[in-house]
Structures are given as C-alpha cells and as structure tokens.
Image (cartoon, helix red, strand yellow):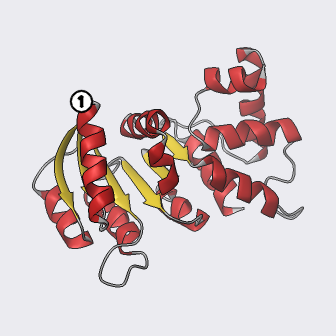
Amino acid sequence: MRVVIAEDDALLREGLVMLLTSEGITVEAAVDNAGDLLEAIGGSAPDAVVVDVRLPPDFRDEGLKAAVEARRRRPGLPVLVLSSYVEDSTAAELLHDGVGGVGYLLKQRVGKVGEFIDALRRVADGGTVIDPEVIAQLLVRRRSSDPLHNLTPREREVLGLMAEGHANAGIAQRLVLSDGAVNKHIRNIFDKLGLPPSENGHRRVLAVLAYLKA
C-alpha cells in the first residue's frame, strides 16, 4: 500500500511515517499543508491519504477541504481524516458522494496501532470507518424527529457498527447474532431509510451518511 500523509505536527507526522513504514506500508510523501498534499497526490497515485482535518494557515478545515478536493479530482480516492475533536459533520461531508473509501478517526486512535492500521486498510479497500467515540456522541444526540426514529434499538446498534466500518461477520460476532439475523437487520435498515437496491452497491455508505446527518 502507498500512502500520502498531511499533518502539520512534525512529531506526529514523523511518528506516522515510522508507524506505517514498520507495517510494510510505503509513505510516498509526508507534508504539512493542504497545498503540498494536493500537489503530492497529483504527482503520484497513492492507495490512500491520511490527513489532519486542521492544517495551516488558519487551522480550521483546510485539511478537510483538501481531502474533498482530492476526491473531486480523483473520485473514490480513499481518505482517512484525523481530528483532535469530535466533528461529525466532517465525516458527513466526506461521505456526501456516496462512494465510500472514507475514514474519520480521533488522533488518540493512532496510539492503538492495530486498530489504526486496520482502519486504514479498510478505508483503502473502499470501506467506511467512523471513530467509535463519534458514534457514541451521535447516539446521545438522537431526537425522535430524526430519520432513524423508525429503527429498532437492535437495528440502530447494527447501523452504528456499520458506521464504525465493521463487516457483517464482525457485527454478528460483536452482537452475538447469526449472519442471517444481521443480514435481515441490514435489509430492514435499508428499507426503513428508503434505500432501494442499486447497481453500484453504495446503500451501505448512504445508510451511514443518513446516520451522520440525522
């Protein structure tokens, strides 16, 4: 796997380079600003991008904007965004195209090497990975008027794990359910959210997007 990193904190940036390299991942470029990130992507074809949501000069959402622009230039480019704080709108903005290949993790997750590398690989494979802490806060904010109101508690659990990037088998293991039961819950989720079958198979991404926007 080939990766481009955009992180303004020099220590974290070098730490990510060392971490990924030790896992057999090639770091094609490690930059500290959005402009250099887009230039690096234009000059190579990375399998994934790891980018801090806040980059110079204003440290607001330059990294997020660069990630969105990178995916506009290269549709479906896998992007894993890192943030110091829970900002669920960040994940929603990245997912708006319904393509997938998007991850949103809190920086504290980097210290859990196994989880971080697993998340990066899933994103590179086209999956969607949202930090469990983001999911937890979203659950607290749910209102009866949101589009997920018709989901059962179990269906919400399943959708939350889908948002974290778990495959059906992983969901079944965590909830102690059969594969058939998980498949049934997911079909019900799609039906209740009004997501009919499609040729591109992006219903899973659209369901997660509905979860984030609610």
Q: Quadrant of residue 61?
A: bottom left
Q: Position of residue 171 (x, y in %)?
A: 68, 27
Indicate the amino acid at tag 1: Gly
Q: Quadrant of residue 157?
A: top right
- 169 w.r.t. 25: above or below: above
| Residue at the bottom extreme, as displayed | 58
- 138 w.r.t. 16: above or below: below
Label 1 sits on a secondary structure element that is loop
> Can the viewer see residue 90?
yes
Q: Position of residue 163 (x, y in %)?
A: 62, 44
Q: What residue is rendered at 29% in x and 59% in y? A: 11
- 161 w.r.t. 91: above or below: above
| Residue at the front extreme, as displayed | 11
> Can the viewer see residue 210?
no
The C terminus, quarter of image:
bottom right
Q: Nearer the viewer, residue 118 or 154?
A: 118
Decide if residue 71 is on the left or right side of residue 170.
left
Q: Nearer the viewer, residue 191 or 65?
A: 65
- Local packing at callout 1 (Cα closer than 10 Å; few below 14, some 14-19, many 20+) is few
Q: How many marks?
A: 1
Reading the image, the residue beneath label 1 is 24
Q: What residue is rendered at 67% in x and 38% in y? A: 161
The N terminus, quarter of image:
top left
Q: Nearer the viewer, residue 58 or 181?
A: 58
Q: Position of residue 189 (x, y in %)?
A: 75, 39
